[in-house]
Amino acid sequence: MPPKKQFSPDFCPLPSIQKHVKEVDLILESVILNHLSESIILCGPSGCGKSVIVHEALLPYSTDKKLQAAHQIVHIDGATHCELGACVDAILSQLQPNKIRLRPNGSVVGTAAEKLKELTDALAGVSTRTGKKAVVFVIDQLENFVEQKNQLLLYSLFDSAREQDLPICVIGLSTVLDVLEKMEKRVKSRFSQRVMTVVGNLFADVEDFSTAVRFMLERRLPDWPENVPDIAAIVLEPACIALVNRLFESRKDWQAVNMLVEIIAAARDPNLVDVPEPATFYGRVSDFFFADPTQRLIRDLPHLHLTLLLCCFEFVDTQQEDTFNYVMIQELYATSTRQKTRSVKFGETFVRGAFFELVDYGLLRPTTTKPRNEPQRYHSLSLGVSKYQLRGALKESDLGSLPTDLRQWCEAHM
């Protein structure tokens, strides 16, 4: 007699998640408890919650001891296992973790037919050792098996299930909505015509999003230390509420929830000596999630490039001109470095190269019209680099190393 599932799935109490988890749970129940072969594909954009749905559906089966003995879970990643030999080896290492396989010089031994026969024998062995034992295959990035035209593995899994009456469940995760249509006819005929579309927005409102954050925190830290504030109190902190609201307005995906939970859990470690205040901490987390790419680019500029960019800003501000050419900026740079005896002096070749690298980075843009017999002119402010972004990217150490007039201009205008 197969073991009975004594409890319902324990998953995040959101209607949109519950609906999908229950559907996957019904398939798992028919395979693990009733020894049928089923399959399902979860399609949706990256970060929409496909992996969360599968994890929550598998949770009751992986936490109950009797149900643990009735099935085995195998995870395959289409990004790294789309080659047949590597994929079979990954499956065998999970089906038979205690079996040692010798690979001369790290190579994969055997033809494709031999590898597939080894896989079939391993699947048969799993079920014969303890009676009918279901095998659940979770294939992430299923589209890679289709786009790489490596569908032989999928065909072999279903073929083994049909010939040997093995209870096999294949759960595919894909960001390609029509992945089923791209399969070969022989594979598609063996795949259950069951596709679940997971929409990108699983949260009806910000309360749902906050509930998911709290739920995942409780799951992430079940043994919450007594000397650390309660999880409910953390989620209700004003700085945390503001960050959650901003995340909901911009992203609304499970990837953001997981990242936020991991950051909060790491910062709330009781072993940490220097724990920042909530406002400071969530401010840093907000900078992490909503980092300005232009500020990040400016922050990583070498000293010469940063100095030239500041020269461009000073030229536009002092000369009241919207455009400039390389000669104008080179002369301003030369004047600035002459005024500070300790400034590093770069040759004209390096200065020219750095200026045009700023153009390549997109921080400077050439004008659409070029005057006759004049050098090419460039914009700086019109391409999206503002004084606010520049001020946010500059550090105190940057200002101290600048030529005197540039430093004074920065202090006065930024």
Image (tube, rainbow, N blue to C red):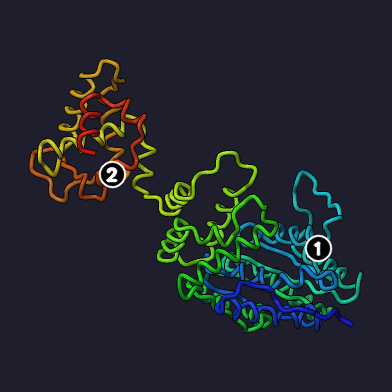
Residue marked by disc 1: 95
Q: Is there any visible trace of residue 310 in the rendered image? A: yes
Closer to the camera in the image, 51 or 364: 51
Residue at image coords 70%, 63%: 75
Q: Is there any visible trace of residue 146 in the rendered image? A: no
When asked about the image quadrant of residue 21, the answer is bottom right
Q: Quarter of the image containing the C terminus?
A: top left
Closer to the camera in the image, 404 or 12: 12
Closer to the camera in the image, 91 or 267: 267
**What count of labels does the image hold?**
2
Is 236 left or right of 5, judged from the image as shown? left
Q: What's the amino acid at mark 1?
A: Leu
Contact check, label 2 and label 1, Cβ < 8 Å:
no
Is 150 left or right of 334, judged from the image as shown? right
Q: What's the amino acid at mark 2?
A: Leu
Residue marked by disc 2: 363
- Disc 2 packing (10 Å; few <14; some 14–19; many ≥20): many
State the image coordinates of residue 209 (x, y, percent, origin top left): 50, 68
Q: Height in image: 118 above or below 100? A: below
Circle 2: element type: loop
When asked about the image quadrant of residue 403, the answer is top left
Q: Residue furthest left?
A: 372
State the image coordinates of residue 117 (x, y, percent, origin top left): 81, 67
- Disc 1 packing (10 Å; few <14; some 14–19; many ≥20): some
Residue at image coords 20%, 32%: 409
